[in-house]
Every structure is written in structure tokens, then in C-alpha cells.
Amino acid sequence: MDNGASSYRRFRDNGDEHGLDEIISDHCDGLMLYLTSIVGNIRTAEELAEDTFVLIGIKKPKFNGKSSFRTWLYAIGRNLAIDYIRKNSRHKSVPLEDAAGLASDEETVEAAYIRKEEGIAVHRAMRKLRSDHQQVLWLVYFEDMSNKDAARVMGKSVRSVEALLFRARKSLKAQLEKEGISYEKT
């Protein structure tokens, strides 16, 4: 399985719009939830995921195949999220009319997806962890990326991702125990 590389190749080289549609349908949910772990807001993550797909749809950057397509796509999304955080770090306000819907929208979308993957208790505990711990756990366990691919997405060495993953698992286990949840897979 090429995780979308052939679809992207068809889109980029042959102008096949269905290739881009396949990429979006295959990767939208996972990318959006990964970006949520970075920016902390599901609506912002949705916009950043859209921006990621728009970027590959318009600019058509070259995929060199040094990593899996999904790793490459998530790295683009991560870079957009970091740019967003840098630009908006000084302005952390939410319009009053949006504030009421934020929690319910985030809970609805995230809870449905995470319950299918591992369970809502693990997800809530993860949200209390540091951002880099959330990211590495998400990439390795929920997106089934190798440590090498997660390192590429996060812009770190494989060795530092392995250490970060060890600390993240330990933090997650402690958080679950703090909440009274016994979870053996951490």
C-alpha cells in the first residue's frame, strides 16, 4: 500500500482530479486530528487540513518518495500548523458567538473517531499531555507510523523520537492512573 503516492502521482502528472479526491478522503480525518494535537482547536485544525490539501492541489509540490506519502503529507500539515501558531501566538481570542460551539463540535468529531480507534478515555488523557507527547503518540499509535516516519514529520531524529515516545507513554500511563483508568497498552 502506497498511502496515496499513486493517487498523487496521477493527479500531479496526469491532471486526474480523482487522485486528489482519493487523497482527501483517505487522509482528511487523520490529518485533521493530528493537527488538532498541535493547535488544540478542531476548527482551526479543519482549516489547516484544508489548507494542506489546497497547497498540494495548487502548488503540486514534488513528492520524492524518501518517506511514505502520508508522512510527507503530515509534515506539510505540521509546517502549516507551526506557521499558524507563530502568526497567531500573540492573539488568542475567540469570538463570543463561536465560543459556545467550540467544545461541543470538538467533542463530537473527536469522540466519534477516537472511540473507533482506541477509546475516549485514552484520548482525553492524551489531551492533558504536552503537545510533543500528544503528537508522537498520535503518529505512532493512531496513525501507525514508524518511529522513522514520525521523526520526519516532527522534524526530529529517530533517537529523539524514541526517547520522546518512551516519556510520552510513561506520561500517558501516569495520567490514566491519575484518572483511575487502568490501561495495559501504554
Image (cartoon, grey):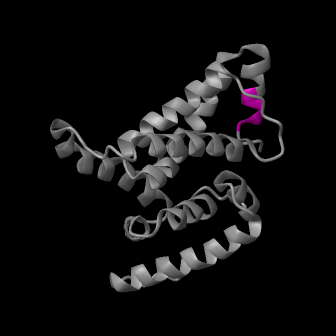
Residue 57 figure quarter: top right
The image position of residue 11, as x and y in percent, is 72, 21
Image check: 164 left or right of 133? right
Q: Quadrant of the C terminus?
A: bottom right
Find residue 133 and report its horizontal and vertical position in percent.
Answer: 53, 68
**Which residue in the rendered view is the most extreme toward the top?**
15
Dominant secondary structure (helix, strand or loop) of the stretch shown in magenta:
helix
State which region is magenta.
Answer: 4-8
Residue at image position (37%, 48%) is 41
Q: Examine the rendered structure and indicate whether residue 13 appears above or below residue 62.
A: above
**Quadrant in which the N terminus appears:** top right
Q: Position of residue 150 (x, y in %)?
A: 68, 58
How many circles with numbers are drawn on the protein? 0
Q: Which one is nearer the viewer's eye here, 142 or 148?
A: 148
Quarter of the figure with residue 73: top right
Q: Where residue 75 sits in the image (x, y, percent)?
A: 65, 45
Give the camera-side residue of 182 and 136.
Answer: 136
